[in-house]
Image: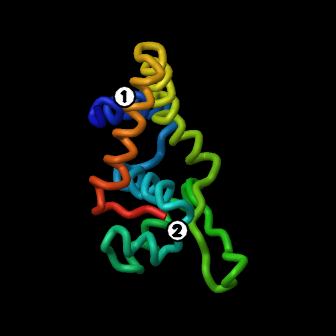
Amino acid sequence: MYTKFKLQFYQEIFVRFQSREASLTTIETYCMEIIQALKEPTINEFASFLHISSPNAAYKVNSLIRKGYVEKVQSPEDRREYHLRPTQKFMDYYNISSAYLQKVMERVKARFSPEEVAQLDRMLSIVNQELMPEVQLK
């Protein structure tokens, strides 16, 4: 199922690439998805999550900033700290895959009873919260 979601996303990206709308490399796309999932991490949190050096993370982030996909936002608590926030440009890019996910979820709700949908939700929550301890999110 995950493969099908990703393949549909890649199809949409390639269509956009044909018309020169896409400008993220594969690694940059992964970086942006991680930044999105980590909910405004600092560069150090981003680096730590990926197990890469802070200078390597900063290099990747600066490329994303130059392309307009991420911005640094100063922390109101610690003025020396900056958080990485996806821009609207990235959100438009990201919504390609989330729009498809929404379409599939509408199909699930149309195909299955409310009880079956609730059971699927419970099962996915257990998988997310208990069976995937290797990936910790805020």
In this rendering, position of residue 82 left or right of residue 8: right
Q: What residue type is labelled 1?
A: Gln
Instruction: Name the secondary structure under disc 1.
Output: helix
Q: What residue type is labelled 2?
A: Pro
Which quadrant would residue 39 be assigned to in this image? bottom right
Nearer the observer, 80 or 77: 77
Where residue 10 sits: x, y (%)? 36, 34
Q: Can you identify the residue that label 2 sits on?
A: 41
Q: Residue furthest right?
A: 76
x 43%, y 26%: residue: 117
Q: Give how far across and how far down residue 80 sits, in percent.
A: 64, 86
Q: What percent of the width, then of the height, locates residue 37? A: 47, 55
Quick one: which residue is furthest to the front in this view? 115
Residue 1, how many percent across, how many down? 28, 31
Q: Vertical placement of 51 versus 66: above or below?
A: below
Q: Which residue occupies 41% across, 55% down? A: 28
Badge 1 is on which residue?
A: 8
Q: Is residue 18 left or right of residue 78?
A: left
Q: Distance between the residues labelled 1 and 2?
A: 28 Å
